[in-house]
Image (spheres, grey):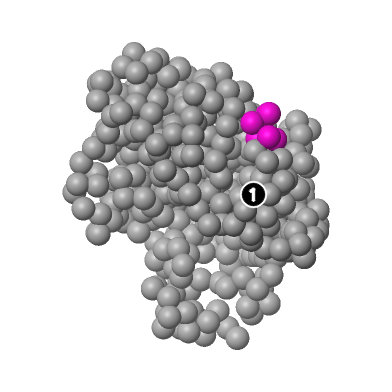
Amino acid sequence: MTNAELFDRAKAVLPGGVNSPVRAFLSVGGTPYFVERASGSKVWDSEGNEYLDFVQSYGASILGHADPVAVAAVQQAALEGTTFGAPTRKEVELAELVCSWVPGLEMVRMTSSGTEAAMSAIRLARGATGRDKVVKFAGCYHGHTDSLLAAGGSGVANQGLVGSVGVPEAAVADTVVVPYNVVPTLDEDTAVLAIEPVAANMGVVQPEPGFLEACRAECDRVGALLLFDEVITGFRLGRGGATSWSGVQPDVWAFGKVIGGGLPVGMFGGSREVMGHVAPLGPVYQGGTLSGNPLATAAGLAVLGQLDDDRYEELTATATTLATGLRNAMESAGVAVQVPQVGPLVGIFFTDEAVRNYDDAKAAADTGIYPRFFHGMLERGIALAPGAYEAIFPSLSHSAEDIARAVDAAAEVGATLAE
């Protein structure tokens, strides 16, 4: 069956034919490919076409698709039961591992998605401080919960939206949106300052020197909590989260993606004091039937167990080669480009100006070059995210040959963009 035929079937039973808006290709045009299977750095669609994949489930598949160790762990877990509604040993082991890696993280609570983790972290911050106001940065995406959709990046921005119909004004009445890389002035009504320590939902925008430190100081000044949303950056940039490379320790964390080994998962956490507010220890309620799911925890343990400093150095080296190659390919073709890189995270903006915040990212997206670049790469068998506000995710399965192939394709596409 062709991709177009599947898409027609999907549109009859799924809004827009998809289960997440960016997958519909609306911001780049064309018909989405339907993945039938994947292995390592590659995916194959319903027509048998092979793609070198730099989506990697938006960063969840850090080892690549269908990692044999993770697959074996999930298979064994499934044989023992897929869900119990009761505690399991593996969720304790995963929590212990994560807490041992992240400085200052003492207790966590598992959820089934990054959205749930961020939503619960906000509720926790409000409960712990007795305050209501949430301050977030434009272009940072913290999931699709009502109070955090204002000026969200990623899927929201890719649809040309600033928020969502169906979110009542009351839901965002206590949400304040400020520009990234500018330290906000908080007041004593602020419960939490939420931030992606590296903004990876408006492309890739790195924090300027001193920015995270100043955000920490501003929270301390007024008694607000600092939330690091590391759903993307957590355990992708390194074992210790943003605290390890920035030296800045938040009060609350949100994690997802990598910690589930490719299965649906989320996690929020903090110090024992802060997490003491979460039920059943305290009055902040959070729960979930599938939280700590045995398949997800088995996969997460299998993936994290393969990550050490050497693997992160390897992944960063791969990302560096890719970023350098993409930059050289575009510049050689005379195409204005910015290719930011933070460790294993890579972005691409078609502009000659540095990108510091969401307004800069939007200006780059509005040039309309990315859809042409996307389709040019796809025609050459290179799959990128179908939206200008997404990151590029090399994995540990991407070989030197894979990266060379991607760079060669970019050089060919760059020549067409310059025409």
Name the side, left or right, on which 278 lies relative to 98.
Answer: left
Give the answer, above or below, for where 105 lies relative to 170.
above
Most prominent secondary structure in the magenta stretch?
helix
Q: Is residue 339 magenta?
A: no
Q: Residues within 10 Å of mark 1 (few under 14, many from 20)?
A: few
* Amino acid type, residue under disc 1 in the picture: Pro
Q: Is residue 97 magenta?
A: yes
Give the answer, above or below, for where 25 lies relative to 180.
below
Residue beneath the point at 58% across and 27% down = 105
Q: Which residues are magenta?
A: 96-101
Residue 413 image offset from top left, x and y in percent: 56, 57
Name the side, left or right, on which 79 lies relative to 395.
Answer: right
Q: Secondary structure at mark 1?
A: loop
Residue beneath the point at 34% across and 18% down = 223
Residue under label 1, please give it: 87
Residue 361 image offset from top left, x and y in percent: 38, 42
Give the answer, above or below, for where 88 lies relative to 383.
above
Name the side, left or right, on which 185 lies relative to 381.
Answer: left
Mark yes or no: residue 407 visible. no
Residue situated in front as seen by the camera: 200 or 231: 231
Residue beneath the point at 52% across and 20% down = 248
Residue 162 image offset from top left, x and y in percent: 28, 50
Residue 110 image offset from top left, x and y in percent: 56, 45
